[in-house]
Image (spheres, rainbow, N blue to C red):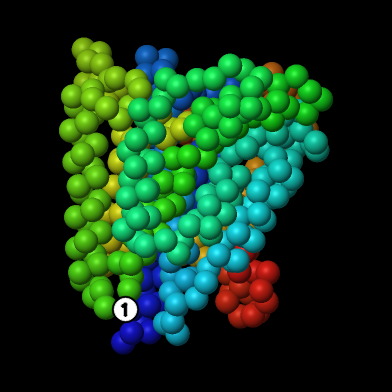
Amino acid sequence: MANNQTSQRINSIDALRGLVMMIMMFDHVRETFFLHQQVSDPMDVGQTAPALFFTRLAAHLCAPVFVFLTGLSAWLYANPPSGPRDAGGFLIKRGLLLVALELTLVNFAWAGQFPPATIYLQVIWVIGLAMITLGLLHKLPPLLLGLLGLLILGGHNALADLSFAPGTVSHALWTLLLHRGYLISDATVNVKVSYPLLPWIGIILLGYVAGHLYAADISVHRRQRLLTILGMTALLLFVVLRAVNGYGETQPWQDHGNNLLTLMSFFNLTKYPPSLDFALLTLGTGMCCLALLEKYTGKLSHIASVFGGAPMFYYLLHLYVLLALQKMMLAAFGANHGQRFGVDHVWQIWLISAALIPALYYPCRAFARYKRQSGKAWVRYF
């Protein structure tokens, strides 16, 4: 029975990871074929079509839920049924690999050239550094880790107005930690931090602490109930803070005299770096989904778990498929939006994504099977 519960809970984690990665496809197709309609952060409600707004809003789930699950999975790695083990080496080595992949394969996939004119330090980079940080801190008492995660995630908005003079070491460190911007902006190859690190450390620490819900002495029903309570509490706190335009988001929502625009304004949150309200909404939704995916299994859960079982393979594969498609369409039809080929409607983003997801299912399933059966150490990192 214990083995069945272990398998089921891992499947639910893989399913949620895979589900947000499937949603991520829509956002990355948008950035590949709809870049001429780029959105700001937060979005401009008055200038963003509702279909584009809600497509982007759904994609907000991806990074925070993935980082939270990375922390949760790290706890599972450190606490297998055979007994606790040191996860520091695994986390640090995998984190370094992710940083290396961001600087090479990932940046090339986005730019289509190497070296690119600008190296963007994005989500894979920040996951790598967050994993390294967790590798160094994971042996601290769970209560301390949880409080540290809450302090970082709940407190960083208080530092939003803190700034340092450009060109100083303090400015560079603050850009890495909390303020999105360029580290190098006047060189042959520039470097821009798209994902400041500090809030993501808070999220991965909270994910690691949440791993204790998967301890052997926690029943399935109790875990599902606790995940639901935590998720609903986060969502309720989001509604309260957002309703009063209180602490937790730098851009207040406004009544636009139109129900749809007002609703869009209410959910228009800052991702870079993730505000407290952004984290409450996305992580609250993620925890509720995690409980539901463990309780209700089905075809969608199975398909999503295939993608979630080979996350780095899927990530690299889908980026290079999108790069190849952009090059092919550019060669076949020419540039119609600047130097790129692009589509003109949001529904075309959905159509391309809906076609690519099943096409990538089979190679991901084959790699996930190889990952389980090969016994080779390197596949654990993908």
User: Disc 1 marks which residue?
Assistant: 216
User: Which is nearer the eye, 356 or 271?
Assistant: 271
The relative height of residue 83 versus residue 98 in the rendered view (above or below) is below
Please give the name of the residue rendered at 37% of the width and 29% of the height, measured from the top-left corner: 157
Extreme residue in the bottom direction: 1
Numbered circles on residues, count = 1
Please give the name of the residue rendered at 22% of the width and 15% of the height, measured from the top-left corner: 255
Q: Quadrant of the N terminus?
A: bottom left
Percent of width and height locating residue 249: 33, 27
Q: What residue type is labelled 1?
A: Ala
Q: Relative to residue 334, is residue 80 drawn left or right?
A: left
> Which element type, helix, strand or loop, lies under badge 1?
loop
Quarter location, residue 121: top right
Quarter location, residue 96: bottom right
Q: Relative to residue 252, is residue 313 drawn left or right?
A: right
| Residue 358 visible, this angle | no
Q: In which quarter of the image is the C terminus?
A: bottom right
